[in-house]
Image (cartoon, rainbow, N blue to C red):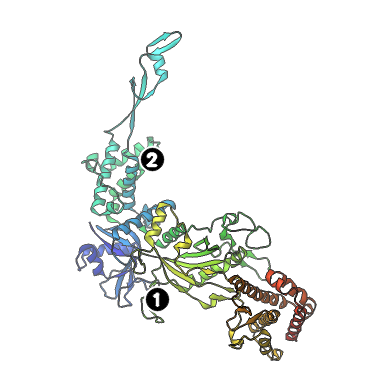
Amino acid sequence: MAQGFYRELKRYTLEEIAFVVTNRRDVTEPVRKAINTLRRYGILKAVKNTIDDYTLLENEDIILTETVSDNTQVLYSFDFVGVVMADNFVFKVYPKYIETTEQLMIKFKQILRVIEKYNNKHQIIYLHNGEDDNFLLNKLTLQLFLLRDFFMNGLYDNERESIEVNGTGEILWDKTINQAFTFVKDNVPYYFDLFTLEMQGDEDNYFRRLHQCILTKISKELYEAGILELFDIDLVELTSEKLEDFGDIDIILYRLLRELQVQFVTRKQRLLKTLIVYLDSRKSGVLEEQISLYGTNSFNRIWEETCQHAFSNMLEQPLETLPANITWTTEHGYYRRKTDKLIEIIEHPTWHKYLDEKGTKAPKTLIPDLITIFPYEDSYCFGIFDAKYYNINFSGGEPGSKNYVTGQPGIGDITKQYLYQLAYMDFIREQEYKYIVNMFLCPCSVDDKVMEDGNTVSNYGYVELNMLHEFGTSRLENITIIKLAAEHIYGLYLSGKRIENIASFLPEQTVSGVNNNENFTIDQATIPATKNKQKTSDINDSLFAANFSKYQYPKEFVLKFQERLIYEMMHDLMNDNFYFISTNTFVTTEENVAEFRETSIQNIRRELAEVAVEINKELTMMNMNELDEHFEQVTNDCIRGHRNLSELISDSSKYKIIISSLKDMYLDLYN
């Protein structure tokens, strides 16, 4: 049986498809017939030849009609991973990320084992091809089932019961007492002979011989097709009998049905039913004229599950089992019970009818592929991973050109990945995780050119969308793209093992610190450049010299200006000890400041930015009368929520003056 390897989604001409399986460039009628069969079942798709080289198929490529054409403008692409048998040809289709044929057989055999485990886990058995009334039997699935059942359970066997004297089987005491000679001494019976029940296999049983014949036949067929090697199955040669030796197909089917009616062992019933289906299909000619396959056209789901396993997906874990110090309160809307799962934190959309404030929550929301929390340095890292079965390459052209990147996910995948992080930001901050990683996990082969020195992971790049990277009051991390050696991930999946130390497994410079300052930034353009150390009071004079109440500003500018106003006025309290320079860092007038001192200063600066945002958020919700009455209380409450900042300004003699000045400026802005 002619056979050959093909790459998923790669574009082929008719001549290239024919050459792989026949070593001939001319497209013979059997090859054309096989291609038509593949097209009819959606395994092979025709696309327009819109580019010069035969690159991988993209989603936006146009799918043509179901005709096989010799037109040079038509190419063909396999939308499938696995083994396909059609019209005496065997097509072995490997995943699109494998770029070389080095050790291809080893890789392909591993992929088939992964598909098998995935199908077994999800109880997916492709016994038929097609749907509804047009289904056809999947011959290869039947054949593999029969062979695997044989290696696991042996041949079909109807054991016969017989009674022997002094045999090795179970003693039949009732028969022995009633029929055997008994010798009694001291009221104790002694039996010189014992009746025993013996179970004998029926080596000449009709169904056992039929089973041997069918196993031998299908084993030889798969051996000639090269299928046994792919699944590591030994050749089975049990008998020289032919199927015709057992009589007409109708007679064989009749005897199998009769045997099924008196057989009550589940395994034997299943085997008999499979033999009936196999022979009945041969009778109708179905098995000889149809396509037969083992694989999937949704390999992306398998890649997703293998990554979830390797990285220890925590989406379905209760919050109480997470590696964090959870404080159980009712103040936060994103969890209520210890048994709530991590996936339930994500908010669901609420649909409202007009004037209906309560609304109805939608049953579905964003669902990330994979969330894991792992130790990292002095804290934990919150990992947001998305398993992307994409073959991303940056080799299409020069940076900035249209074809620089190919095979990348679409805008929908990118926006969702940013939103996954946004959905969990409150939870991340509440649990005080210091680190975060947002990442696309893409497959590649272990011998791919992006892999160096035998590594199993490569930092390949990142994708950025500025309108989400700087989103409102949350700074979202850009999405890192890493390539994983699929063979390593599959090995973990098949063995049941996981990545033990995710922190050391990930490439360097892929983990970022969590931004806890609500993205409050000081605009460098508004701060005069200062080679000398300029004090805050001088900067305040330059910032607030103009009368802003005379002009109309966009709302966002006014809000940012008010936050900046609070920041600068509060910062003036620290003039005696610190200077504010153009790099937005604090330094002290003392030399040789210890590292822990600098860290404390940075923390105070961050808290000051947070206070500015919090105060302004509260004040902008008030009308002028509320502002005049509650300004001091709101400001004090916000500052008390930040221990370091509260300690620094609580005893300051300037504090009341600063608060009074801020109040006057706010009231002036409202006028």
Near mark 1 (Cα within 10 A), the count class, few <14, some 14-19 or many ≥20, is some
Examine the image and state in which quarter residue 204 appears: top left
Give how far across and how far down residue 437 sits, in percent. Answer: 51, 67
Q: Nearer the viewer, residue 51 or 151?
A: 151
- Residue beneath the point at 38% across and 79% down: 403
- Residue beneath the point at 32% across and 49% down: 144
Q: Residue under circle 1?
A: 405
Q: Nearer the viewer, residue 598 or 572?
A: 598
Give how far across and how far down residue 26 sits, in percent. Answer: 20, 68
Image mark for residue 136: none
Examine the image and state in which quarter residue 656 appears: bottom right
Q: How far separated are the C-alphas under marks 2 and 1? A: 53 Å
- Mark 2 lies on a secondary structure that is helix
- Residue beneath the point at 62% across and 55% down: 338
Near mark 2 (Cα within 10 A), the count class, few <14, some 14-19 or many ≥20, is few
Name the side, left or right, on which 385 lies relative to 282.
right
Relative height, residue 590 to residue 301 (above, below): below
